[in-house]
Image: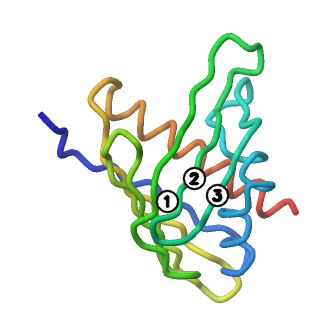
Amino acid sequence: MKNSTTITVETTVNAPIEKVWEFWNNPDHMTKWSFASPDWHTPYAENDLKVGGTFKSTMAAKDGSMSFDFAGTYTIVDQHKKIEYTIEDGRKVSIIFEPLNEQTRVIETFDAESTHPIEMQRSGWQAILDNFKKYTEEL
């Protein structure tokens, strides 16, 4: 039975929409921010940002003890506005980009999985989003 719970995380990045979009979607940047804690990293990312295109990133513990691939297929790509994709396990993700003068609000909503507690999933995805904000604002 599919879990119907959705989780939303968000942040406001002190950067214009063009920079936020580039840093969110460029694999060279993705490897610098896409991890939930300092003992993890993303050593590999690829991204074919178009409807029907796919993405994949490898998230790994820095000590080499564990890794996994996060991959999916894009269903909506509306430049500087919205991205939707389906993860390989069938869950859906939607990301809204809202320009606010020289800032950008990023709102990410995803179908929860049934293995881990909801709050653990929320805090993990929020930590990744917080890393994105920090990385984007520092460059």
Please give the residue where the numbered disc 1 appears in the rendered image: 10
Left or right of residue 61, residue 96 in this image: left
* Name of the residue lying farthest toward the bottom: 101
* Mark 2 or 1, nearer chain start: 1
Identify which residue is drawn at 59% across, 51% down. 129
Q: Residues within 10 Å of mark 2 (few under 14, many from 20)?
A: some
CA distance separating discs 2 and 1: 21 Å
* Mark 1 or 3, nearer chain start: 1
Please give the residue where the numbered disc 3 appears in the rendered image: 47
- CB atoms of marks 3 and 2 within 8 Å: yes
97 up-or-down from 8: above or below: below
Q: Residues within 10 Å of mark 1 (few under 14, many from 20)?
A: some
Q: Nearer the viewer, mark 1 or mark 3?
A: 3
Q: Amino acid at mark 3?
A: Asn
- CB atoms of marks 2 and 1 within 8 Å: no
* Name of the residue lying farthest toward the right: 139
Q: Which mark is residue 55?
A: 2
CA distance separating discs 3 and 2: 4 Å
Among the 4 quarters of the image, the one containing residue 122: top left
Give coordinates of residue 61: x percent, y percent.
69, 21
Q: Which mark is residue 35?
A: none
Residue toward you, 55 or 82: 55
- CB atoms of marks 1 and 3 within 8 Å: no
Give coordinates of residue 64: x percent, y percent.
74, 14
Q: Amino acid at mark 2?
A: Phe
Residue toward you, 25 or 131: 25
Q: Residues within 10 Å of mark 3 (few under 14, many from 20)?
A: some
Q: Which quadrant, please, contains the C terminus?
A: bottom right
Secondary structure beneath disc 1?
strand
| Colouring scheme, one of rainbow, by chain, secondary structure, one colour | rainbow
Q: Amino acid at mark 1?
A: Glu
122 up-or-down from 54: above or below: above
